Amino acid sequence: MTEDNFRAVCELAGKDGIKAILGLLLPVSDYAPSKQTTRRPLADNLRLNDWLRNYATEIHAPVADYYSALVDDHGMLREGYSDDGLHPNERGYAVMHPSPRRPSKKRSKSEPGSQVSGVLCHMIIAHPKERSTRNPSRKELTIPLNVCKI
C-alpha cells in the first residue's frame, strides 16, 4: 500500500517534469516516554527503506539518506535527537541540515550527519508547480516519509 503511494507520487511528479528525490524513513526510538517501536516496528522501517532504495535505483532517482545520519547502534533514532522518539528535534534537524551539494568539511566520519547522502536536504515543495528557492529554473520535490503509515 505505502509502496503504491510512492509509485503514484513519483509517476505524477515525472509526468509534470518534476525530479523526485526519495527520502528514507527516519528511525524511531523508545528513549522518550512514548514508545514508538510499538506502532512502528524497526523491521518495518528497514523493509520500507530497502524498498525505497531499490525503487529509487529503478526510476533513477536520488535518495536523501537521513536514516543513516540519525540511527544509533540499536537501530533507533539517536538518543537526544528527538523529544518524542518520532520527530527530530533541533539537534536532529541540525544533523540533517548539511547539504550534500555543499559538503561540510568540519565533520568527522564518526560524527552524526557525516554520512548523509543524497541531493537535497530540507526542501519540501508543497505544490508541484512551485519552483525551488535554491534554483528557480529547476522544479524539485522531496517526498517526506515520516508522514506515511506503514
Image (cartoon, rainbow, N blue to C red):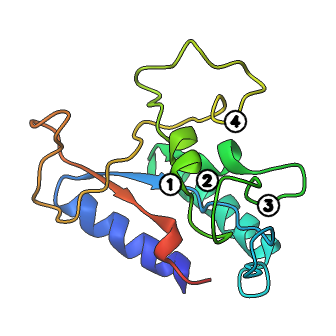
- Where's residue 21, x and y in %? 40, 50
Identify the residue position indicated by label 1 in the image: 23
Which circle's residue, 1 or 4, is located before the other in the chain? 1
Which circle's residue, 1 or 3, is located before the other in the chain? 1
The reply to whether discs 4 and 3 touch (Cβ–Cβ < 8 Å) is no
Instruction: Assign a secondary structure to mark 2.
Output: helix
Q: CA distance from mark 3 to mark 2?
A: 19 Å
What label does residue 53 carry, if any?
2
Depth check: 4 or 38 in front? 38
Mark 2 neighbour class, 10 Å CA radius: few under 14, some 14 to 19, many 20 or more: some
Q: Amino acid at mark 4?
A: Pro
- Quick check: 93 left or right of 115? left
Q: CA distance from mark 4 to mark 3?
A: 13 Å
Quadrant including the C terminus: bottom right
- Where's residue 31, x and y in %? 80, 67
Give the number of the mark in front: 3 or 2.
3
Q: Is residue 98 above or below residue 146?
A: above
Q: Amino acid at mark 3?
A: Met
Q: Residue drawn 26% across and 69% down? A: 12
Q: Amino acid at mark 1?
A: Gly
What label does residue 112 carry, if any?
4
- Quick check: 115 left or right of 148? right
Depth check: 24 or 6 in front? 24
Depth check: 9 or 126 in front? 126
The reply to whether discs 1 and 4 touch (Cβ–Cβ < 8 Å) is no
Which circle's residue, 3 or 2, is located before the other in the chain? 2
Q: Residue drawn 40% across and 24% down? A: 101
Identify the residue position indicated by label 3 in the image: 76
